[in-house]
Amino acid sequence: MTVLTLEDVRAIHDLPLTQLVFRAQGVHREHQQPDSVQLCTLLSIKTGGCPEDCGYCPQSSRHDKTMDAEPLLDERHVLSQARAARDSGATRFCMGAAWRNAKGGEQFERVLRMVRGVRALGMEACVTLGMLDGEQALALKEAGLTAYNHNLDTSREFYSEIISTRTYDDRLRTLEHVSHAGISVCCGGIIGMGESIDDRCNMLLTLASFSPQPESVPVNALVAVPGTPLEAQPPIDPFELVRMCATARILMPNARVRLSAGRTALSREAQVLCFLAGANSIFFGDKLLTTANPDGDDDMKLLRDAGLSPIAAEPEQGHVHAQKAPRTVRLPIAVV
């Protein structure tokens, strides 16, 4: 197996854009359904009051202007939102809680019931709850969780410029627990936070070095929210997002590359160029965790006009709650 270097990734990323997109489209057609896009809906099930200091996030309690802390949502409300998402065409329902660590006790049990309920609707279930331990990961797997989202955000080298309340290895350790439990890893990052091109490529290199590689890779453009430390960051050039999607597709051919936050600032043409570059998943619905997202009707029209179609839900294979044996995983982590 060839071991990639930063120089290798940078050489791919910096190809002339038409060559890069052409190469990525070839990889995409070989490994993915070429004209299909997965629709995922994301719901904040516990908003605000987070003790982390992530510079991009309005849910942090450490910033001058923060969102009010809200309790964990009622299960019935969450499942009604999941049902509506399914009926609109989404096949994956993602639930996010603004916690540093996944809570224990009754709150964790409620999340497990939400996961079971989403799976009972015939949807994939994904959660992001902060850091996990091994027992929590196994419990989520037993409940039927499809994927766990835990983004790296950026490179190891730039990470401390954005977050000081947890380390890069903390994030990698959670991903190790998730993968070892047999849950698919959903992991990506954000561009436009002031990082260098090398930082972006180093993040992709880290993701590509996971074994197994992530099942899905969200590519986010910073939404500069007033009141956060990154509120003055200028918007990125859309071609930078295209390059990230294409490079991720080439490095991780079997992953779903999810065009995530920042789509409201993209033209229809820029979004289609991202699809051409290998993106094949979007968040569907008018809101992400706390920021705006394109209108669902507009997204469906965009897909129709581009000749793309939503990926259909796959039939269940066996019992939802069947426990797989833990996998041997390799992550680039230095546990101390």
Image (tube, rainbow, N blue to C red):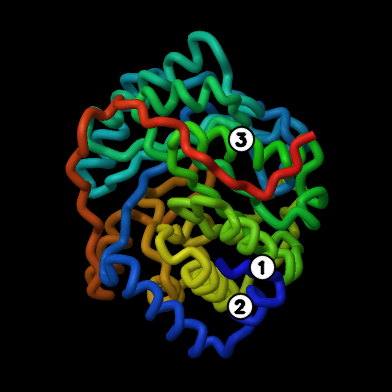
Corner quadrant of residue 270 = bottom left
Q: Earlier in the sequence, mark 1 or mark 3?
A: 3
Q: Position of residue 271 (x, y in %)?
A: 42, 71
Crowd tier of the residue under label 2, counting other residues whose Cα lies within 10 Å: few below 14, some 14–19, many 20 or above: many
Closest to the observer, 115 or 233: 115
In the shown orientation, is residue 46 left or right of residue 41? right
Residue at mark 3 to residue at mark 2: CA–CA distance:
28 Å
> Do the residues under discs 1 and 3 have CB atoms within 8 angstroms?
no
Crowd tier of the residue under label 3, counting other residues whose Cα lies within 10 Å: few below 14, some 14–19, many 20 or above: many
Q: Type of residue at label 2?
A: His
Q: Position of residue 142 (x, y in %)?
A: 38, 23
Crowd tier of the residue under label 1, counting other residues whose Cα lies within 10 Å: few below 14, some 14–19, many 20 or above: many
Q: Earlier in the sequence, mark 3 or mark 2?
A: 2
Which quarter of the figure is the N terminus placed in? bottom right
Which quarter of the figure is the C terminus placed in? top right
Closest to the observer, 219 or 237: 219
Q: Type of residue at label 1?
A: Cys
Q: Secondary structure at mark 2?
A: helix
Residue at mark 2 to residue at mark 1: CA–CA distance:
8 Å
In the shown orientation, is residue 26 left or right of residue 218? left
> Do the residues under discs 3 and 2 have CB atoms within 8 angstroms?
no
Up the image or down, 59 lies above or below 305; here it is above
Up the image or down, 24 lies above or below 261; here it is below
Corner quadrant of residue 269 = bottom left
Circle on res. 201: 1
Closest to the observer, 313 or 175: 175
Kindly identify the residue that appears in the image at 40 percent across and 18 percent down.
Answer: 74
> Do the residues under discs 2 and 1 have CB atoms within 8 angstroms?
yes
Q: Which residue is mark 2?
A: 13
Q: Position of residue 182 (x, y in %)?
A: 44, 36
Q: Which residue is mark 3?
A: 174
